[in-house]
Every structure is written in structure tokens, then in C-alpha cells.
Amino acid sequence: MDSLTLDIELLQLPETSPMSMKSYQDFVKKLFDQWLALPETNRLVESLVNDVKSGVSLNVVSGSSSATNSGSNSPLASMFPARNGPPLSPRNSTGSPRITRQRTGLSNLSSPLKVVSDHVIKELIPQFYFEDGRPPPNDQKEQCIAKINTLFHGHEDGLQLQEFKLVTSEICKVPSFLATSIFKKVDTNNTGFVKREAFIDYWVKRNMLTKDIATQVFTILKQPDKKHLVQDDFKPVLKELLATHPGLEFLQGTPEFQDRYAETVIYRIYYYINRSGNGHLTLRELKRGNLVDAMQHADEEEDINKVLRYFSYEHFYVIYCKFWELDTDHDFFIDKENLIRYSNHALTYRIVDRIFSQVPRKFTSRTEGKMCYEDFVYFILAEEDKSSEPSLEYWFKCIDLDANGVLTRNELQFFYEEQLHRMECMAQEAVLFEDILCQLFDMVKPEDEGYICLNDLKGSKLSGNVFNILFNLNKFMAFETRDPFLIRQERANPTWTEWDRFAHREYIRLSMEEDVEDASNGSAEAWDDSLEVPF
């Protein structure tokens, strides 16, 4: 058949069901190939391609009058007459609209216009997902390699760790105490040297250059086969920080104390950042937190105590001394009777029971009825910083006796009853529960007047006082009397958290006690590490 003289009418076939067309696939394919060979079809495809390249939208099978009018001068309009639907083959008298619609769908699926459109779209839409991150622009890549060449010049065998630290600050621009972690990631064979080619492969070719700093830190610290960080991943970072930071130099003679400091920092990081509480810190959690900013602050600040987030030595010292005071037999575990003495017996027995029932958090201690140091860190951060979301979630679980997600009148009364009894025993003016209940709801202003949910507490600035009223008598009385010292401290440091203020007060108290003890002894004798914790 001559393709140049083939009339378009020859394409109009009698009404045929989809099943019968499947049995004549070879004939349909041959007929379709004949149609593609028509000069009109060639002009049509060329016109459509040009329209797509120029940004004109395609309305090949539009049933609207606007689409028909807009295409009236195109080859498509000359081949198919204008109508309110796609071009259809004539039907015989027995054909049904349903069969016609099915044939229309089959025709659209077989249309070469869709293939052409997909091909053009792939050219117009650039790649936006890269498994290893977006590749750097050529000029940025060349500048980075030029700097690398300069730093590695004259070191054919590679750089050792001390020499490599300059690369960390000049090229990677991450905190300096990550140098060891990067060095080990590049020196996979543990040769003690990092060669230029190996570093370029790790930092440039793997697109570390274009990642944000949080993703860089996450990639540097995590294990290659993992998608999260565990506590052990931070140990090399803390070891490097302790070895190099001038504010921690005085600890170099006490390795055991260095370990306690590193553990405390890691526990604080996971308390605030790992909100899922599963011990697996994800990239999303890292980006949502302030850990990277704190790392950069610690890298720039010589006084480690000014880095209030996570790394402050004073904060660590307060936590460790508080634990040491309660752990009377120094077996590194505390039980209920130990914890009930916390802050001069401030807590009620009922709330301590809830803590040791492991409702707010499962203990990492493997000893029944005992709380280890990590468990205590979580407790003290929750107790002394009730303005934070991790603390609100911790204590909400304690008060929510039936774990139904709301705090009811009965649950609030259950915990307040012991507070009321303690006030009566101390000959203090007791406040009836009905009055307290009104006060609690006024502070929280819950959406539903019948109960308090976690979101209500998170939306109130006085939520911490709700829990203090229920189970911490000392803080309840301080709130009732509006302690002027606390008010003055808040005004002096408005950016500090409740934890920052508590740690500051306690560190001053501990320092004064040490001064008094030194004066009473008459000399500053050496510490017996087996009996007391060093300062």
C-alpha cells in the first residue's frame, strides 16, 4: 500500500470490540505504522514537538471549544474535524456508546503523542533527586580541589591526624573535634595516613561539599550501614573534645571523670534531641534540634561553661554531685528510698512509685528496682526543667494513671491528696483540692473543661507549676509565696531556661560547701577518689 496516497478515511474501521482487536494485534500495529508514515502525521508530530519546546500546552483530546478553536490552524485540526470529544471512528447501527468509549480509551493509550510528550518533559524537567546529594557546581568543585591540592602539597604519602586537622577547618568547615571521625572515615584501612585522592573521593565525589552542616555531621558520625545515630557514635567526638578543648584541660589527669562527663553530655543530647526515645537519633531529629549550633559554639568558645546547651562542665558537675549525694553506698545505683531524699524530700511517694514503675521511661538499668546514672540524668532534667517538652511528656505519663491521653479530676486529686497531707503534717495552711482544681484549669486553660490533655500543657507557660503543685512540695510553696530571689534571677537572665537557673544556683552552693570544707580541714589535701567525687 502506498503511504503517500493513503486516504485518512481508510483508517475508519467498522465497530469492533476491544476483545476482537486484541486478536488482530498484528493488523492493528501494521495499520498504525501506515498512519505514522503519512505526510500529515509527520507534520502533526513536528508541530506538536515545536509547541512543547516553545512552552505551548497540548490540548490534543480536549473536548472544550477553546481547545478546538486554538488548534484550528494546526495540522491536527486539518486531520480531524472539530467536535466536542476526541476523534472517533464511525459506528454501525448496532454499536453501543459503552463500546465506543472503550475503543476511545484504547486509542488514547496507543497514541504516539504521549510518548513524545514524556520524552520532551524529561528534557525540560532537570533531575531534582540525588541519592548522595546534589553534585557541586563545577566552579565550586574546582575551587575546593585547588584548596585540597594546596593543603596536601608535599605530602605524597598523605597527612597524619594532626596535619589533617587543618583540612577539617579549612575545607570541611565543621567543628574541629570532628577531625578524628572524618580521618577514620577516609582512612578505611587504618594506615594512619589520609591521601589526597582518598579525601577528594570522600568529600568531593560523594557530594559532601554541597550538603548542609547538619547532614554533614550526621554522615560523618553514623555507621555506613545505619540510617541513625546511636550513643556510641558520639564517644569519639567527646573524646576529641576532652583532649583538645582548653576549658576541659584540667580533667586530663582524671580519666574516670572524663568518662562521666562524656556520658552526661551524650545523655543530655538524647534527652532533648531523640524525641522518639528509642535511642536511634535520625537526621530529621538532628535538624530539628540545636545540637549542631551547640557544637559550633563549643568549638569557638574557650570557656566551656558558657556553652549552656549540653557541654557545660558546671551543668555536668551538678548532675553528677546530685547523683553522688543520693547514691549513699556508691554502687552507681539508687532505689526508691534514695530518690525520695532528692531535694530535701521534695517529692511525694506516689510520684516516686510512678517513676520506678518505669511509666515515663524504661530504665536502662538491668537491676530490678534500681535506677542507674543514665536514668537519673533523664529524671533530673525532667524535674528541674518543666518548661521543656520532654519534661512535660515525662510527667504527663506519670499523672495519666490509665494511659488514656487525658488528665481527669480523679487523677489530679489522687496525686494532690499526698501533698495536702504533707502540708497538714507541717502545720502549713492547707489548700483544698476544689480550690487547687480551679487554679490548675485557670493556668492551663484547656480546650475541654472536663480534662487536661498534653497539647493543653504544651500551650501554657505555667504548665511546670501544675506538676509542682501535684507532687513537689518545695516548689509548690515557692510558687505560692512568689519567692523574690527566683523572680530576681529570672529578670537577670531572661534567656536562661529553668534548668540553667537551677544548675547555676546548685553549682554556687556546691562550691561554697567545698570552700567551707577546705577551711574546716585547714588545708587542701588530696581527694580520696574511692570515697568522694572530685571537683
Image (tube, helix red, strand yellow):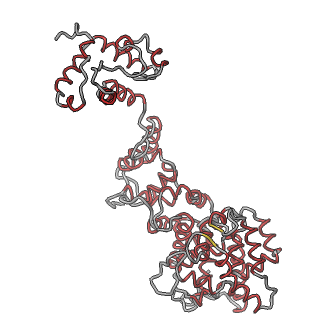
Residue at (54% x, 63% y) in the render: 273
Identify the image quadrant of residue 14.
top left
The quadrant of the image that shows the C terminus is bottom right
Residue 219 visible in the displayed image: yes
Of residues 265 and 374, which is closer to you in this image? 374
Residue 322 placement, left or right of 146: right
Identify the image quadrant of residue 73.
top left
**Vertical placement of 489 versus 186: above or below?**
below
Farthest residue toward the top? 5
Residue at (24% x, 19% y) in the render: 13
Residue at (56% x, 90% y) in the render: 531
Residue 263 placement, left or right of 207: right
Of residues 160 and 353, which is closer to you in this image? 353
Callout count: 0
Of residues 93 and 458, which is closer to you in this image? 93
**Vertical placement of 306 versus 125: above or below?**
below
Residue 88: x %, y % from top left: 33, 20
Residue 235 visible in the displayed image: no
The quadrant of the image that shows the N terminus is top left
Residue 388: x %, y % from top left: 64, 66
Residue 396: x %, y % from top left: 61, 72
Residue 186: x %, y % from top left: 38, 55
**Vertical placement of 53 versus 144: above or below?**
above
Of residues 130 and 278, which is closer to you in this image? 278
